[in-house]
Image (cartoon, rainbow, N blue to C red):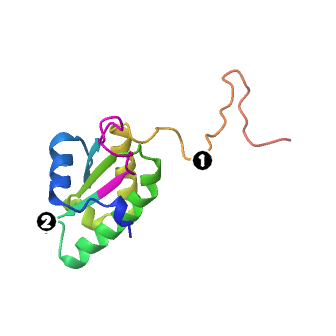
Amino acid sequence: MLPAAARLRRSEDFRVVLRRGSRAGRRRLVVHALTTDPSEAADAPSAARAGFVVSKAVGNSVVRHRVSRRLRHLVSAKLGTLPAGTSLVVRALPPSSTASSAELGSDLDAALRRLGLLSSRRPAGDVPRPTRPADATPDHGSAV
């Protein structure tokens, strides 16, 4: 569950993000993002917040709640890395009903990268494989 300070709750907040924010669509979801400038905010910059839209087109209530739980878990892990004052609205599309958490996560990451909210560097555990120089002799696996 997201803490109350990290949730978009009022319909006006959703409306502002959807109308004035940037949008990045993927096969299973659409992410709308709006980053407010801390200098124009009246008070201290707020933490990143997120809201979710999962319509009846996604499926019955069991399916919709499963999709929203998966999205909430994925977004909660990313909120700390987003700039302060960022508001996200994640809208699930009908193909999200049959998607795994990994597929939803890859779509979310791709959308956040496209919006410029997530760096495009590799994850810490993903180490590139070393390549052999072009002039090296081919290794056929036999040392004899």
- Res 115 quadrant in image: top left
Q: Give the amino acid type for the residue marked by disc 1 in the picture.
A: Ala
What residue span does the magenta drawing correspond to? 35-50
Disc ID at residue 124? 1
Q: Is residue 43 magenta?
A: yes
Disc ID at residue 57? 2
Q: Secondary structure at mark 2?
A: loop
Q: Is residue 27 above or below residue 56?
A: above
Q: Give the amino acid type for the residue marked by disc 2 in the picture.
A: Ala
Q: Secondary structure at mark 1?
A: loop
Q: Residue furthest right?
A: 144
Q: What is the tally of numbered marks visible in this picture?
A: 2
Circle 2: is it few (<14), some (14-19), or many (20+) Cα within 10 Å?
Answer: few
Q: Residue 106: in sight, yes or no?
A: yes
Residue 65 appears at what percent x and percent y?
27, 74
Q: What residue is shown at x 19% (from left), y 54% (from top)?
A: 14
Left or right: where does residue 98 sit relative to residue 109? left
Q: What residue is shown at x 38% (from left), y 70% (from top)?
A: 1
